[in-house]
Image (cartoon, rainbow, N blue to C red):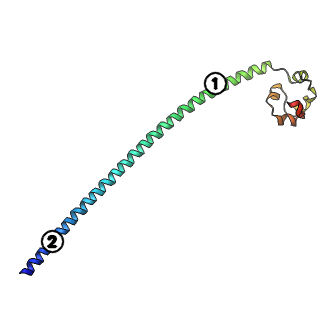
Amino acid sequence: EALHRIKMEHQEAVHELELNFDKQLADLQIERRDERNMLKADKANAISRLEDEKAKAVQQLKLKHAEQAYKLVELQQDCKKLNDTLRGTLPQLDLFLTNLDMLQYEQGLREAGIDSTERLILASKDDLQEAGIRVGHIR
């Protein structure tokens, strides 16, 4: 009978340990699940904040782009007005070259596609050299 009682006490102790272990395991699983849920919520909040920041940045860039596009249109209009004014005030190429005593370069300029005073003004140093103008006269 003493052996039976010890065996029963041992079984109760084992059972109690198993129950305690199962409870601790369940508590740990709940704790782990809660931590995962918190991490998921933190991640979702961080993503949401980043998406908001991204949306704000995109909106700011769109506004800046619109402002720059508007300024570009204004500049293009100003350039067109200046070009129109310039065209009306520039002398013909041959008169311009005559006034500079450089009429000898007219044929070379025209062959190089520089057939107006406007194009002459816009030509690069290399363009002028290719048209046969000496470096000293380019300056």
Give SS at disc 1.
helix
Instruction: Name the foreground residue: 77 vs 68.
Output: 68
Q: Which amino acid, by three-letter code, is at mark 2?
A: Ala
Residue 102: x and y, percent?
91, 26
Residue 92: x and y, percent?
85, 22
Q: Is residue 99 left or right of residue 50?
A: right
Q: Nearer the viewer, mark 1 or mark 2?
A: 2
Residue picked out by circle 1? 74
Seen at 51% across and 37% down, the residue is: 58
Residue picked out by circle 2? 13
Seen at 74% across and 21% down, the residue is: 84
Quote the CA–CA distance across marks 1 and 2. 90 Å
| On screen, residue 125 above or below 98 | below
Give SS at disc 2.
helix
Residue 130: x and y, percent?
87, 37
Q: Residue furthest left?
A: 1
Instruction: Name the foreground residue: 120 vs 46.
Output: 46
Count of labels in the image = 2
